[in-house]
């Protein structure tokens, strides 16, 4: 139980302490789905923790054929280890601001503007909508907003593909870049955008950057802090209630934001349970016992089966 004097904040929530022992559960798939469905049915609250694996399962793969088909000209022009997938390409040392925004405008079009609401995210919304719920996500593709989750119930802690900021974070404000990215996409030639489209910070006049957490200059603006406050309020409300932690595709890229904290919460609170859906890393802490279910394989099928499962 939480004491009245010790409130949960995002900084106290994140954790770097993993469980000491993991297990792959050997029960048949149908038994695991049935158990997870019963957990959701009996819960008062659902806290969704969504990582990159959810977007990959929904169709927004960062690598493979999707990357090669959409970024062929960038691969041919720059090559090297950076141009192996969209994530790695974002760290390429582009020779100019025009070249950098040439890449990022393409990436935003492919991952944020063109896809629209994806079916898997809509199914997740249907799964959660009958309970009091909240979403903590490291994904930056805006899908939870696009598929109808309330903005007041989403904390996108790592930023958003649609926002830009001062590269040095000289002031705590972000800017909507969607219309600019559309113009860049139309004007791009030889992987670069015209100089007149390169954004400059309206305060210091310096270069601008994507609002994605990658260094100490990431801008946490007022909307970010409002979302963090909403998240903390939800935690303080649900922590001593019957709550399901529904973890979707959170792996070991940034485990201290979702995966490890969820495990610690289950260890510390007997009223909490964990449902972990993950393609290859569905193992769960052995010490959680019956309060943890790990389901591997096709996530979209698992969500569909959870939606259609008749509780007995």
Image (cartoon, rainbow, N blue to C red):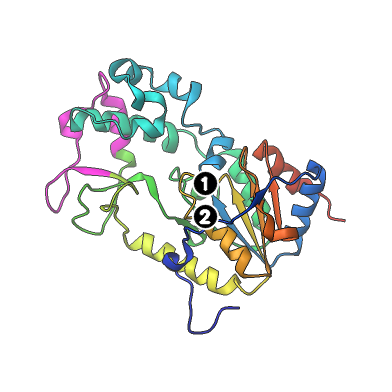
Q: Is residue 149 visible?
A: no
Q: Residue furthest bottom?
A: 4
> Which element type, helix, strand or loop, lies under badge 1?
loop
Look at mark 2 in the image and give the residue it sits on. Answer: 258
Q: Is residue 100 visible?
A: yes
Please say if 122 is above or below 190. below
Residue contact between numbered discs 2 and 1, judged by CB atoms under 8 Å: yes
Quadrant, the C terminus? bottom right
**Measured from the top left, where is residue 260 in percent x and y?**
53, 56
Q: Secondary structure at mark 2?
A: loop
Q: Nearer the viewer, residue 251 or 111?
A: 251
> At 37% from the left edge and 64% from the top edge, which residue is drawn?
225
Rendered image quadrant of residue 28: top right
Q: Which residues are magenta?
A: 180-209
Q: Is residue 5 left or right of residue 99?
A: right
191 drawn magenta? yes
Q: Name the residue furthest top.
A: 76
- Residue in view at x 54 percent, y 69 percent: 235
Question: Where residue 74 appears, x then y in whole percent?
Answer: 32, 21
Q: Could you classify mark 1 by the number of other residues whose Cα lies within 10 Å: few (under 14), some (14-19), or many (20 or more)?
A: many
Residue 76 in the image: above or below residue 262: above
- 103 above or below 285? above
- Labels 2 and 1: the sequence-earlier one: 1
Determine whether, in the image, residue 37 is placed left or right of residue 18.
right
Q: Is residue 245 one of those drawn in magenta? A: no
> Image quadrant for the N terminus?
bottom right
Query: From mark 2 to mark 1, how far is it between C-alphas?
Result: 8 Å
Q: State the count of labels.
A: 2
Position of residue 165 measured from the top left corner of the image (x, y, whole percent) = 26, 49
Q: Residue at x 73, y 59 (%)?
A: 289
- Residue identified by numbered label 1: 51
């Amino acid at each position: 139980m939480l004491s009245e004097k010790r409130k949960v904040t995002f900084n106290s929530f994140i954790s770097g302490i993993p469980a000491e022992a993991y297990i792959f559960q050997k029960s048949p798939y149908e038994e695991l789905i049935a158990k997870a469905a019963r957990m959701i049915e009996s819960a008062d609250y659902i806290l969704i923790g969504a990582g990159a694996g959810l977007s990959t399962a929904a169709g927004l793969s960062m690598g493979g054929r999707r990357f090669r088909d959409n970024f062929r000209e960038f691969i041919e022009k720059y090559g090297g280890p950076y141009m192996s997938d969209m994530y790695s390409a974002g760290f390429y040392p582009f020779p100019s601001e025009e070249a950098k925004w040439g890449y990022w405008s393409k990436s935003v079009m492919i991952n944020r503007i063109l896809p629209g609401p994806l079916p898997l995210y809509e199914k997740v919304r249907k799964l959660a909508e009958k309970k009091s719920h909240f979403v903590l996500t490291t994904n930056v593709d805006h899908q939870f907003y696009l598929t109808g989750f309330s903005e007041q119930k989403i904390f996108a802690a790592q930023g958003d593909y649609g926002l830009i900021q001062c590269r040095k974070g000289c002031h705590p404000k972000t800017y909507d870049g969607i219309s600019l990215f559309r113009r860049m996409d139309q004007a791009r030639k030889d992987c670069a955008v015209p100089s007149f489209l390169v954004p400059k910070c309206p305060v210091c006049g310096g270069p601008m950057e994507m609002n994605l957490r990658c260094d100490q200059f990431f801008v946490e603006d007022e909307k970010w802090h409002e979302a963090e406050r909403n998240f903390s309020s939800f935690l303080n409300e649900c922590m001593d209630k019957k709550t399901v932690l529904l973890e979707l595709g959170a792996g070991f890229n940034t485990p201290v934001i979702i995966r490890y904290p969820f495990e610690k919460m289950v260890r510390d609170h007997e009223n909490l349970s964990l449902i972990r859906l993950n393609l290859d890393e569905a193992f769960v802490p052995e010490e959680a016992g019956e309060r943890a279910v790990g389901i591997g394989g096709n996530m979209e099928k698992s969500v569909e089966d959870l939606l259609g499962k008749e509780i007995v």
